[in-house]
Image (cartoon, rainbow, N blue to C red):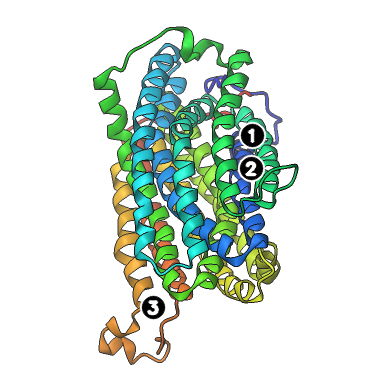
Amino acid sequence: MVTPSAHPKTHTNTTPVRTEIRALWLLAWPIMVGQLANIGMSVAQLAMAGHASAQDLAGVSLGISVWNMVIITLMGVMMSVNPLVAHHIGAQEHSHIPHLVRQALWKALLSGLVAAGILQSSTLVFDFMALEPVTHQVAVGFVQITSFALPAFAAYRVLYGYSASIGQTKPLMAVALGVLLVNILLSWLMVFGHGGFTALGGLGCAWSTLACVWINLGGLLWWMRRSPAFASTWPFTQWEWPHWPKLRSLLKIGLPIGVTYFAETSAFALIALLVARFGSHQVAAHQVALNFTSLVFMVPLSLGVGVLTRVGHALGAGDPQAARFRAWIGVALGLAFALMSAGGIAWWRTEIASMYTDDAVVVALAAELLLLAAVFQLSDAAQVVTSGAIRGYKIIRAPMWVQLLAFWVVSLPLGYVLGIAPHLAPDGVRALPWFPAQALQASGFWLGLVVGLTVAGVGLMLLLHQVARAHVVGRPVRHTPPQTADH
């Protein structure tokens, strides 16, 4: 259990910055490993589908694009539990947490069922796309099969947020690593037909995903039930029917976060759908580049979850000065990692693409997109870590508007013009020497992402500065250094 008010023993040469970096890292690194394991499932699946055929890879890519759009939106809706639990922990109000988690699980069940219906209906979009028959079959089948995992996924995300916000992040890591191994085994058996299984190609990835989401939920529940760290806040000590006022308050927080997540993930997913007109190679290259950058993105995303928890604990304890300090330390760590990841992606972009497929055309196209991905590493890290810090302040709607502006007003329209319709640009813009004479296809959309993520990163950093300053001004500053989490 986290005890934010406890003063850790520190060496005399330990500075507040080092103390906070250590505290944040202790909280974030298990989240990071768990997130990498989760995204590692799709990495393994895409690699296996790519070695089955280019059409299987394209079908799984399209299916994952739609699946990710729904589950990441659902993840945001479930995230209302994170700042609320973190504030209760900071205020030492442990008795409030079980009721909160029980109601969040009711919200998860209802939201998961609604999301499953939406995902089933979304397969209609593939009927309006010029897809090869095998690609169409795999894409539709992937979405239909995985939709039955959504109630379990929503419940898992509630328990995930509860566990992370009380400082128990290692169970998330351990369960995710175990499920990753199960997923790789099941995908290998089902995609290629080993061990007596029928070779299902890309659809084998869908069945393994469905199984592993439910295994993930069961594994986390098993761990939490056996761990004494959850005893004082364990939510399953009694039955409780839905409490509609509480559900409405949870949705009031969760829906704007869901919209924020949807703004970004839908932009990436829509790109896959729009470039499908250029053939399976363009779709596959986009998904390869997106999948690897999503893997790298898990590090700043995990820092963002850790910063949310650290900021929430400080504010719950009535220390806005520590909250601001913790927020900016997290942003600095995210930017430092982004500098390293940008260099690595740019240097090894061809080798990275070759891990996914043997198709030389896909490798070359994906390498071009990965170079653009290297460019937006700093802005992407900035926007996700600052988002986490702002949510720690329970500021929800303002980040949503920044993300909607960045992706739907800037990134997608610009990407559409550069990627598909350069003739739509004003005459003065088309006369510029750098403006493309022909559609850049997937690369045009990724250039739009570079600009959109820059807008999001700068906008959210300015917002964090305003929010943190407003909480500090007019309040006494406590000079004790930020406290570490007791794991």
Q: Quadrant of residue 78?
A: top left
- Residue receiving disc 1: 173
Residue at the right extreme of this rendering: 195
Which labelled disc corresponds to residue 418?
3
Residue at image point 66% right, 75% down:
360
Q: What amino acid type should be assigned to the residue bearing mark 2?
A: Ala
For the residues bearing labels 2 and 1, Cβ distance under 8 angstroms: yes
Q: In the figure, 381 relative to 322: above or below? A: below
Exactly how many numbered labels are in the figure? 3
Label 1: which secondary element:
helix
Residue 68 visible in the picture:
no
**Which of disc 1 and disc 2 is earlier in sequence?**
2
Q: Disc 3 and disc 2: Cα gap in Å?
A: 35 Å
Dot 1, how many residues are within 10 Å of its Cα: few (below 14), some (14-19), or many (20+)? many
Q: Where's residue 83, x and y in %?
A: 41, 31
Tag of residue 307? none
